Amino acid sequence: MGHPARAFSRGLLTSLVADEPTLLSRDTERRLRELGIPQELTGPAPTQLRREDLERAHRTIALKRDEHHAMMLQSHPEWADRIEYWDVHDIDFAHPDEALPQIEAKVLELIQGLRS
């Protein structure tokens, strides 16, 4: 979209999903293909969020506060209340066909806000 901002994705407590074969769920990979957004997978396991990632980010966003705030308290307690949480359920409460459009809308809203 020509915006100078760049985003990167990290996982919280990736050891919980160490057997996951890709960085993204199949549903997310499928949706990215449908949108024509290229993917660059960097390895066979999710990339763990590190303190350096938090320090270099201008804005940090996680989904579903009820789930991710506790993970942040466990892994990076000093950052748990300094990041933004989007109220989007994970697959434990919402099917990807419901959650992914919510995430897309939030991302588009974020991009519009950055342009303003």
Image: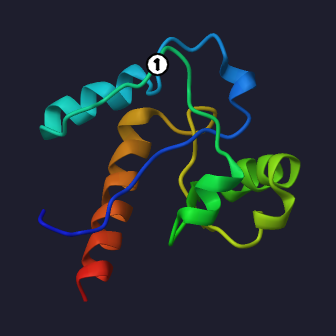
Relative to 108, 93 lies left or right: right
In percent of the image, x 53 and y 65: which residue is there?
57
Q: Residues within 10 Å of mark 1 (few under 14, many from 20)?
A: few
Which of the 4 image quarters holds residue 24? Answer: top left
> In which quadrant of the rendered view does residue 11 lie?
top right
Which x, y percent locates residue 7? 38, 55
- Vertical comparison of 29 with 22: above or below: below
Q: Which image quadrant: the N terminus?
A: bottom left
* Quadrant hosting residue 81: bottom right
Q: How is the image coloured?
A: rainbow
Disc 1, SS = loop
Q: Which residue is mark 1?
A: 43
Tell me residue 71's x, y (percent).
79, 46
Residue 10 vertical position relative to residue 47 in the rendered view, above or below: below
The picture places residue 78, in percent across and down from the top left corner, at 83, 66
> Where residue 73 sits: x, y (%)?
85, 55
Instruction: Report the front residue among 9 and 85.
Output: 9
Question: What residue lies at 41% left-to-right and 25% top-to-bottom?
Answer: 42
Amino acid type at mark 1: Gly
Residue farthest toward the bottom in the current orientation of the protein? 116
Q: Is residue 94 above or below residue 102?
A: above
Residue at x 57%, y 47% (from the top left corner): 89
Q: Does residue 48 appear to the left or right of 80 in the view shown? A: left
Number of dots carrying numbers: 1
Specify the quadrant that holds the C terminus: bottom left
